[in-house]
Image (cartoon, coloured by chain):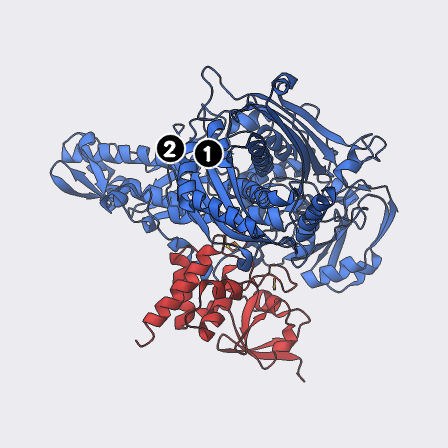
Chain colours: A red, B blue
Amino acid sequence: MPDDLIRFTLNGRRIAVPSTRGHLGDLLRHELGETGTHIGCEHGVCGACNVVMDGRVTRSCLTLAVQVDGAEIETIEHAGNDRCGAALQDAFVARNAFQCGYCTPGMIMTARELLSENAAPGRAEIRDAISGNLCRCTGYQAIVEAISDAAEALRETADD
Amino acid sequence: MTELANSGIGAPLPREGARRLAEGRGRYVDDITLPGLLHIAFVRAPFAHGRLLGIETDDALEVPGVVAVIDGRRLAEICAPFDTNPPGVPGHASAPQPPLVVDESCFQGEAVAAVVAESRAAAEDGAELVFLDWDELPAVCSIEDAQAEDAAPVHTRFSDNLSLRHRFGAEDVSEAFHGAAHVVEADFSFGRQTGVTLEPRGIVAHWDPRTEELEVWQSHQVPWQMREVYARQLGLSPQSVRVTAPDVGGAFGLKLHAYADELAAVAVSRLLGRPVKYIVDRLESFTADAHAREARASCRMAVDAEGHILGIDAVVDAGFGAYAMHPRGSFGEAMQAAQMIGAPYRVGAFRAEVRGWRQNKAPSGAYRGVGQPIACAITEEMIDLASRAADIDPAEMRRINYRRTLDEGTRATQAGLVVEELSLDACLDKLLEAMDYTALRSEQAALRAKGIYRGIGLASFVELTGVGAGLYGPLGLTVAANEACRLTLQPDGSLTCATSVTDQGQGTLSAIAQLIAGEFGIAPEGVRMVAGDTGRTPYGGGAWASRGMALGGEAAKRACARLRDGLLELAAGILQCEPEALRFEQGEIIGPKGASGLDLAELAALCHYRPYDSPTGQVPPMTVEESFVPAALPYIASNGVHAVHLEVDPELGTVDLLGYWVVDDCGTVVNPLLVDEQLRGGIVQGIGAALYEECLYSEDGQFTNGTLADYVVPMAGEMPDIFVEHVSTPTRATGLGARGVGEAGTVGGLGAVRTALGDALVPTGARVSQQPFTPGRVLAAIMAAEDAE
Ligand code: FES
Ligand code: FES
């Protein structure tokens, strides 16, 4: 960063922002206006801040803004652009798999990674996969069902 | 399906209006920004009890971006301290709580100075450099210490630490215990918890000197209450204050209160004439959000040889923390914890004494269920102990003691509770069938023989929902307990419902839209909901005590009836028939000859644009407002039964949840999709209380587990699937018939885990009195029982 800019790709857009000492979550939310990524703890436990960095789900609160120089970042605002993200969003609405919705963006980012690796996860596998995402409102059951429904919908439309 | 379309009630409709939340388009308070916005970081008290001698701010003011450092003395010039001593609670005593410490601080984490800066980071840098000079004072933290004869005072204005003392029921119940076949007795200890909303508290406040108006955006349940609070504390006209709750990321009672730090943020804006933002971080949440539940109790129960309860005698000691929570106080939890003991049962003689103790810890306040989870847990374990003493199956023991309604000729139970018809028998029947109780019992017996300890626990509850003015008025609280609906027919035929009810994810707004749509036979998308904004909604309560549907739904139903009556009368004039012969179907008026061609859009256009086309020359009002508060009853009681199946590992002390069932009666269910997951969410919080959650303080009052890694909340992996079923007994208090449901899961969850654990441990002879039931406590109880043998 010779010119003291952080350059990265955000949701397909090339971005250059002045270097900041804050974390990625704050950069996305407060400098770039992408407020769909939420901050729940800032110490890596709740998963509300999950984004995708170079293809892996990452805690944006534990990632320094300067660390994303040269990286590709995807956030919830962009997740609906692929089949899997859209299927999850549909299923979350259909199953009422959220109440306040504060955990939902992080939950969907996690679930999307699960479904990209496992097209037919069982309930226990789903529970395990989202065990790093705190939801304080629901009983998790609707979330498990929504992820399971989304997986099924994706399998059914796989060849379309 | 036709009937569903007609009524709108009972259909499991998804919340399409909430789709934006799943797409990252929520607007929570931290997502709001204003030109010229300043940020606050607070310097907080490092000790549980101290006297502030001085504040050194020079270094902080040097930090680039820091605009001001404001202390308690400066704020005291423009902002009054909270005085939380409701006149209707005799003997209640709490010290005044200023927005920022002026000289004495009473809990670790109390806000002392506000550092105001161009960015939050600069404010935090500044806060690091504020130097506080303190005299540390003796701190009193546990309930036992607060009770001690020679205890130091939590606040130096008092000589002891007793904040409240009250008795429910008779003065003396010894008679009932004399000839009893069995008397059982137990001690209980309930750990201090906090609500842990995933979105922490937060506020944006803007005093605009140009308009002399204060605008506040706050993550909160009750904007109208907060308007009154800010106006009162700052000496403003309530009419110059507007409070808006944007999307709120969970609330659970925690966001029902007025907090000193949030008041300080508002006062700072008033002082500087600039918009300010303050977002609570997770550590501050743990140390300065309302805590709850900390209590110790002892209870005795007398039963006859057939298992009928003859008497209950209980004492509850509750930990209030340093101040009474503003404006509703901290006594609600303690009072309900005592008063609701035995609520589902005919208990014979009843006496419950309650005492509330000040402590040098964070103030305690409302958290989902408010005292009722404690009462339920005590009651249900006492029932189990009695059923073992009398050798009666626990399910049968409950059935023979259930209360069905008030005793003839009485207006309340001995504890002073007003309940209408209950359906506990029907709930229990459904529950036992769903879980296959008999089969589980025989499996349990077979496994016990192999040294596998499984437990089956039941918990019945009665819950006070939709609490109305009858409670708050007499206490002298300026809290509106009615819920209101202002319904407008727009010129294009769509409807707008502005409601005083607020929604933090419960789905109440969607359910009210569904209800209104049903009244006109239109799709819910045809109803626009407006809520959480004192500038745009009618005066009323908001969200607490499970009131959204029970009260807000009723107000909406009544508003629909009035708007519809006016429109039908107009249509009857046009169609030359009686209004009674007309009804709405899919937004169109259907008359004796079928479809009339008159729909909402046509009627609206006539009323708004061509009133002269009305046969009478008159058009009905296009906006009607209805407000509802239960008049005949102080609240609307609901009831239900929970069951838990679990296994205890006697080597590790761990508890594995195998199954969970609940049968709930919340009267009319408007949308089961929303209600069922509400119940599950509440149950998971009850499980958290039972097994994991506890605010741990060191002896000298330092909060020791202030991260989400250390204060453990339930995650998906440990939670069981939860079976939900309903019995529906519509309340007669309203036309809609809905009872509250938002807290029912939490009220029964704690008790059901407690009784299941007790049942599992029967062969070991162990009993765990202290909650949460951590592996360490379970093991210690098992070992103590082994030693006793
Ligand atoms: S905010 Fe990043 S894990 Fe909680
Ligand atoms: S829906 Fe509120 S935290 Fe998950």
Q: In terms of secondary structure, where does tag 1 sit?
A: strand
In the rendered structure, find residue B247 and report the number of the disc placed on it. Answer: none
Residues B663 and A29: in front is B663
Q: Is residue B170 above or below residue B554?
A: above
Work out whether mark 2 precedes mark 1 in sequence or the reverse, and give the earlier one.
1
Q: Of the residues shown, which amino acid type is indicated by label 2?
A: Pro
Between residue B551 and residue B422, name the one nearer to us: B422
Task: Please tell me in which quadrant of the rendered image residue B354 appears.
Answer: top right
x and y percent of residue B712 in the render? 64, 55
Label 2 secondary element? loop
Residue B568 visible at all: yes
- Circle on res. B638: 1
Pointer 2 residue:
B730
**Which residue extends farthest bottom?**
A2
Image: B95 above or below A89: above
Q: Which x, y percent locates residue B692? A: 63, 51
